[in-house]
Image (cartoon, rainbow, N blue to C red):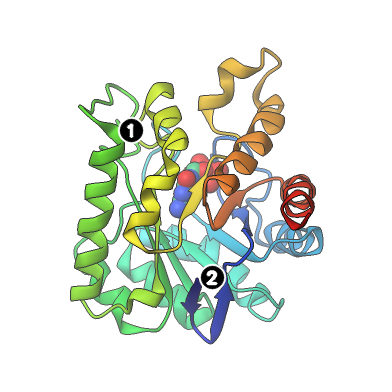
Amino acid sequence: MELHCGTYRLSLARPLIMGIVNVTPDSFSDGGKFHDASRAIEHGKQLIADGADILDIGGESSRPGAEPVTEETELRRVLPVIEALSAAGVPLSIDTVKPGVMRRAVCAGAVIINDIAALQARGALDAAAAGNAAVVLMHMQGTPASMQQAPHYSDVVSEVKAFLAARVAAAIAAGIDRKRIAIDPGFGFGKTLEHNLALLRRLDVFAELDCPLLVGLSRKSMFKGFSSRGMHQRVPASIAAALLAAQRGAHILRVHDVAATRDALAVLAALESG
Ligand code: HH2
C-alpha cells in the first residue's frame, strides 16, 4: 500500500512515524514548549534526526475543552514552521480543520492535510481537492470543547467505521484520489477508555476500508489509569499502544516520542523478519 502526497509516494510496507510539532501554547502534553516558531523548527529537525518519516505541524490545540483559535493566529503560528521545514527532507502535514489554513499551508509546502473534523467544515473538501496533498480523515464525536462530556455509542467500532466510509466516499466524490486518502479512528476524540480499547482491539476491521490507517495514541489521557506517576509517565504506555496498533495493521503512528517509538518498531521488525 502507498500514500500519495504531493510528489511523495510513501510506501506503507512498514509502519511510518509521524512526529508531532505543536506550535501551540496549550496542547495537552507539550503545550507551550514549542510555541515559539524557532523552537518548533528546532524540535521538528530533532524529530527528523530521531527517525520521523513525516512531521505533523499544528497551530490549534484539540485537547478536551480547548478553545478554538482564529485563522490569523493559526497561520501566524504554523506558516513560518512549514516554510522552514519544507526542505528538511520529510513530507510535512498540516493539522487543521480550517480550509483557509489548509490552502495556505499547502502553498507553503505541506503535502498532507490532517483534519480531525474529516473535511466536514464548509469549503474543506474543495480546499483539499484543489491541490495534490493527501488527506487524513479522522473520526470525532462532538467538538473538542465538549467531546469528553458524555461520549455515547451503541457499537463504537461499527459507528466509527461507517462514519469513515462515508467521509472517504465524500472525499472521492469531491475529486480527491483514493490514493491520497488515509483514515483515523480518532482515539480520545469523544471516546471513553472502553471505547478507545474497543477500537484498538478491533483495529483490523478498518483494513476493510482499503485506505492507509493512521493512529494517534501518543500521551493521551486514556493512559492516565495505567500509571500513577503523572502526565509524562504516559510515554511507556503510549509506546506499547503504538506497537500494538502497528501489529494490528496501523500504517502511520502519530507520536511525540519518535526515538522511543522507532526503537520499539525495530523490535517488531526484527521479530517479523525471522
Ligand atoms: N490527536 C491530536 C491532534 N491531532 N490528528 C489525528 N489524525 N489523529 C489524532 O489522534 C490526533 C490528531 C491530539 O494530540 P496533540 O497534538 O498531542 O494535542 P493537541 O491537540 O492538544 O495539540
* Viewer-closest of 67 and 113: 113
Q: Please name the residue that numbered disc 1 is placed on.
A: 190
* Viewer-closest of 97 and 125: 125
Name the mark nearer the viewer: 1 or 2: 1
* Count of all numbered marks drawn on residues in the image: 2
- From the viewer's perspective, is 242 left or right of 107? right
- Point out which mark residue 144 bears: none
Relative image position of residue 254 (x, y in whole percent): 57, 51
Cα distance, mark 1 to mark 2? 29 Å
**Mark positioned earlier in the residue sequence (1 or 2):** 2
Residue drawn at point x = 55 percent, y = 81 percent: 9
Specify the quadrant of the image occupied by residue 130: bottom left
- Is the distance from the Cβ of mark 1 to the nearest ligand 1 atom less than 8 Å? no
* Viewer-closest of 154 and 121: 154
- Is the distance from the Cβ of mark 2 to the nearest ligand 1 atom less than 8 Å? no
Relative image position of residue 135 (x, y in whole percent): 39, 68
Relative image position of residue 204 (x, y in whole percent): 43, 46
Q: Label 1, secondary structure: give it.
A: loop
| Extreme residue toward the front, this view | 274
Tell me, yes or no, if residue 211 can be seen here. yes
Q: Please name the residue that numbered disc 2 is placed on.
A: 79
Q: Label 2, secondary structure: give it.
A: helix
Badge 1 density bin: few <14, some 14–19, many ≥20, Cα 10 Å? many
Q: Amino acid at mark 2?
A: Leu
